[in-house]
Image: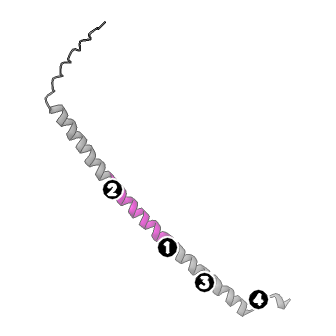
């Protein structure tokens, strides 16, 4: 029965492998979190840019509407009558 019990050396190798795996996992998690933070910052910058451009567009549309409303209406041109001639 003693043959099946892990020796100190086997237990030490197992612990070392566990620590290496844990370190790799922690490194992966930190990289993932860094990428998520970068994506969140890029998304926030894009949202701010979109809001700024939307405000500029709405202001321009308001100014254009005011310009059209304040412009004097142009009289409609009279249509020229066309004469249809009947030829035999």
* Residue extent of the magenta highlight: 29-50
Q: Position of residue 86 (x, y in %)?
A: 29, 8
Compared with 37, 75 (above or below) is above
Residue topped by disc 4: 6
Quarter of the image that includes the C terminus? top left
State left or right for residue 13 relative to residue 2.
Answer: left
- Residue occupying the point 64% across, 82% down: 18
Eye-nearest disc, 4 or 3: 3
Which of the two discs, 4 and 2, sits closer to the camera? 2
CA–CA distance between discs 4 and 2? Answer: 60 Å
> Which residue is the site of mark 2?
48
Q: Indicate which label's residue lies in the foreground, 2 or 3.
A: 2
Q: Earlier in the sequence, mark 4 or mark 2?
A: 4
Q: Which of the two discs, 2 and 3, labels the residue nearer the N terminus?
A: 3
Give the total of numbered labels. Answer: 4
Question: Real-space Cα distance between discs 2 and 3?
Answer: 42 Å
> Label 3, on which residue?
20
Residue drawn at x 42%, y 67% is 38
Residue holding disc 1: 31
| Residue 87 occupies quadrant | top left
């Amino acid at each position: 029965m003693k043959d099946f019990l892990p020796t100190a050396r086997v237990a030490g190798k197992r612990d070392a492998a566990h620590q290496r795996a844990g370190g790799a996992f922690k490194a992966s998690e930190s990289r993932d979190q860094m990428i998520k933070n970068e994506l969140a910052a890029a998304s926030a910058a894009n949202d701010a840019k979109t809001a700024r451009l939307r405000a500029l567009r709405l202001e321009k549309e308001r100014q254009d509407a005011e310009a059209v409303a304040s412009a004097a209406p142009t009289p409609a041109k009279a249509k020229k009558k066309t004469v249809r001639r009947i030829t035999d």
